[in-house]
Image: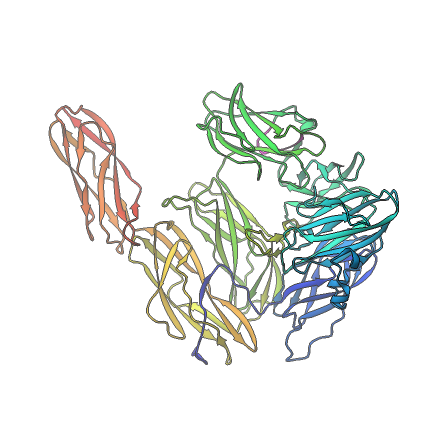
Amino acid sequence: MNLIHPLRWIVAFCVCTPLLAQPVLEQLHPRGGRTGTAVRIVLSGKRLGPDPRLLSQAPVVATPLSGPSAAGQMPPRKLTYLLEVRRGARPGAYPVRVETSEGISNALLFTVHEFPQVTELESDPESESDAAANDLPETAQPVDVPVTVEGRLQGPERDMFRIEAREGQRLTVEVAARRAGSAIDPNLELLDASGLVVARSGDAPGLGLDSRLAFKVPDDSEYFIAVRDERFSTQDHDFYRLTIGEYGFAENVFPLGWTRGAKVLVEFSGGSLSGSLSGEVDLGQLSGHGGMTWVPVPGTPSTVPFLLGDGEEALEADSAGVLREGVVMNGRIAAPGESDRYRIAVASGERWAFELRSGELPSSALYGVMTISSEEQTLAIAGEHAGDPNPYVITSTGETATYPFVNLTVPPDVNEITVAVEDLLGRGGRAFAYRLAARKMNPDFLLSLNEPFVNIPRGGSAVVTVTAERRGYEGPIELYLESTPDDIEVSGGHIAPRSTLGNTLPRFESGRLTLSAKAGAELRRIDLVVRGRAAGEGHEGLDRRATGPGLRAAVKGVSQAAVTAEWLGYDLPARVNPEQPAYLEFLTPRRQRLVRGGSGLVARWAYHVRRPGVQVKKKVEIPRNTGSLRLRRVGDDAPESGEFRMFTHERTSLGMVNFNLSATVSADGREQAILSQPLEIEVVDGYGLEEPGGPLVVAAGGEGVWAGSIWRDPEFRRAVTVSAVDLPPGIRCDAAELDGAETAYELGCTAEPDAKAGGYQAEIRARSLLSDEGTTRYDVDPVQAGVTVRP
C-alpha cells in the first residue's frame, strides 16, 4: 500500500509500548465507600470512551451518571457512577477498571470499609483550595470520630485534622496508602492541644510502609492528627485514606502463611490486643493465584497480610524437630535467647537450598539468623554480618536485609544436617514467627509479568514482557500461553541462555512475548495465562506460571519500586480491540539465523497505512543494542521502508532473540502506538571442532602429525587457532593457524627422548575472535582425544 502523506516517524525496538488509543485511569474519587451506603465516584483519565463500562469485582451495584457521548465527540476525560455498596460486604480493596470499544484500562483500587467517610476539603475538586487549606493546627479540618478521611498530599505538604476526644478512649489512627495503590510513603503524628507530638508512626508492623498508632486518651481535649509523605515527594498517585476510631487491630499472625485452598487455625496478636485471638481462616474462598492475601482479625475491622503457598505446610509443634524436603515449616522464636533446631536427612554430594523468611514480612519482627551444621561442624551461617565458616561447600548465602538463604553441597560422609533459627538480637515472643524451607537444588526459575494487562489490536500486535528469575537453570526459556485462542497468534517469547562470555551472570532476565490478533478476531475481553518452559536439553518438564502485578503505580524518586498488588492474583487481563489505522511489517523473513562471529545480518522493514489521514510522528530511531545484539542503520531510510544490520558482540548468547518494530501515528486527532510482529533471530556458533580421525601416535624422541578439521558456517571467515593442551609430560605440539575458509589442520608434535611410554588423554581446543572490535575471544567446546607414546 502506498503512503498517503510524507512520514516523520519513530520506529523503535521496544520492550512494550502502550497502545495510545486505549483508556487510561488516572484518578478515582473517592477511593472507597462504606458498607450499606451509596457513594458517587468520579473516574478521571484519558480516552474514557466510546461506550465506557465499569469493570469491578467489588461488592457494589454501579449505575452510570454520565450521559453517552455524541457521535464524533472526543472521548470523555471523566466518568461518574453511583456505587451502592452491599450491606454486609467484606471490607477490603477491590480493583476497578474501565472497558471501552477501544480496549481496557489499568486498574485502580476501591476500598470497602465500615466507618462514615468524608473528604479532605483541600483535595475536594468542588472546594476552594485556599479557604480549605489544612496545613497548620490553626487551619486543621475538624472531623468527627469514627471516620475515614480521603485526602491527597499534593507535593511536599502535610494535612492536619482536629478531633474531640474523651478521657479513656482507646483510639486507633491509621493511614492506608501503599495498600490502596498510592505512591506516597505516609508518616503519621498525633499532637495534643498545645501542638506537642505525643505519638508518631512511620512504617507500622503488619502494614509495610503504611502507618498506624494506638493511643489511650488521658483527658477530655482536642487533638490534631498530621499526615505527610515520609520523603516530602510529589507523586501522581498522591492519595491516602486516614481512619480514626475505637477498634482493635493485630500486628502479628501465626502461622505467617499456609497452603492455598486449605483451612487453618490462625493466632492473631500484638497491636491493640491485650492477648491473642484465634480463628479459622478459610483459604478456599480466594480467587486468583497471588502469593498473599489479607485475612480479617476476629471481632475487628482490621486485617493482616497472610502468605499463600502451593505445597505442604507444617507447624513447629507437630514436627518433632524434623524438617522435610519441600515442606514449609512454620515456627516461632517464643522466648528471648531461644534457638529452634531441625534435623534433615541428606546424602553426600547433594546440593541443597535453605531459605528463612521472617523480618522482611509485614507480620514478623524476627531478625532471622540461620545456621547450618553437621554434628559439631558449622557449615554455613546466613544473617546480618555472618561469615561463611566453610566456603568449600557453600554455593552462596544471603543476608537478613532480604531474607537468609544458603545454597550448599553436602560434604563427604554427612547424612544429616541441623538447621538452627534464632533472632540476631536475641529477642523472642509472639511476634517472632518464621517460615523455613529446604529443598534439593534442582535447576529452576520463576516468572513474573511486567504488565498488569494488555490490549491486542485486530490485525496488529502487542508485547508482554516477562522477567525470569534464574534459580539454577541457565538454559533457554520459551514463553507461551497456557491456552491460545484460535484467533490469537503467539510469537517471540525467547529468553536466551546465560552467556558464557563476559564477567557477569545476571540473576534476572527478561523476554518479550508478542500477541497478535488475526484480521477476523472477535472483539472481546479474555483472561490469559502466560507460562514458560525450559528449552534446554535434559530439563523437559520444567514449566512455570508467570505471576501478574495486578496493578502498577509508578513511584517518583531514585530507586523507588512501583506499587503493585500481586495479592489480587491476576494473570493477564486482555482485550481484542479494533484494527489500527496503520501497521508495520518485516520485509525479510521474520525467523532467521545469525552466526556469532560472522559478518552480521541485514533486516528490512516497511510501514503501511490502512486509510487516508494517518501521520507518523518522528524520525526513525534504531537503538544501539537490543537484547544481546548490536544494531546499526544501513544507508538512509526511505519514508516507507528502511533497513538495519545486526552484529554479535562479546556477551552475545547463543539461542533465540526476538524484538519488535514500533511507530507512533496520529489518526483522527488521536495518537496510537503500533507494533510489528517480532523478528526472531537464532544466534548460532560460526565454527566448531570435530574429533580427530584417531589418536596422536609418537615415539619417544620422535615427531608426529596430529591431523583433524573444524567446521565453518559459510558466513564465518575469521582466523581460527587450533592447539593441543593437557598433553602428557615430554610431549609438545605446535598450534595451527587456519585463515579464511580453511578447515583442515595439522599439529606438528614432538616427544622428548625420556617421554614415558603409555596411553594418555589430551584436549584439542580452538580459539578465534568475535567480529565486534576484533579483541574478544570466541572459543568453542573442546574435544577429547587420545595420545599414544611408544618406547
Q: Residue furthest front?
A: 194
Q: Nearer the viewer, residue 190 or 640?
A: 190
Is 166 positioned to the left or the right of 520 in the image? right
Is 622 positioned to the left or the right of 762 in the image? right
Q: Is residue 487 above or below residue 259?
A: below
Q: Position of residue 783 (x, y in %)?
A: 28, 38
Using the rendered image of the protein, determine whether residue 433 is visible from the camera's viewpoint: yes
Residue 7's quadrant in the figure?
bottom left
Using the rendered image of the protein, determine whether residue 327 is visible from the camera's viewpoint: no
Q: Is residue 22 above or below residue 74?
A: above
**Count of labels shown?**
0
Q: Which residues are magenta?
A: 323-332
Locate the C terminus by quadrant.
Answer: top left
Q: Is residue 645 above or below residue 73?
A: above
The colour scheme used here is: rainbow
Q: Nearer the viewer, residue 285 or 450?
A: 450
Is 89 positioned to the left or the right of 370 in the image? right
Q: Nearer the viewer, residue 296 or 42?
A: 42
What residue sits 22% from the left and 39% below the top? 723
Q: Residue furthest top?
A: 376
Whether residue 550 appears in magenta in the rendering, the answer is no
Q: Nearer the viewer, residue 344 or 541?
A: 344
What residue sits 80% from the left and 41% below the top? 298
Q: Position of residue 98 (x, y in %)?
A: 67, 65
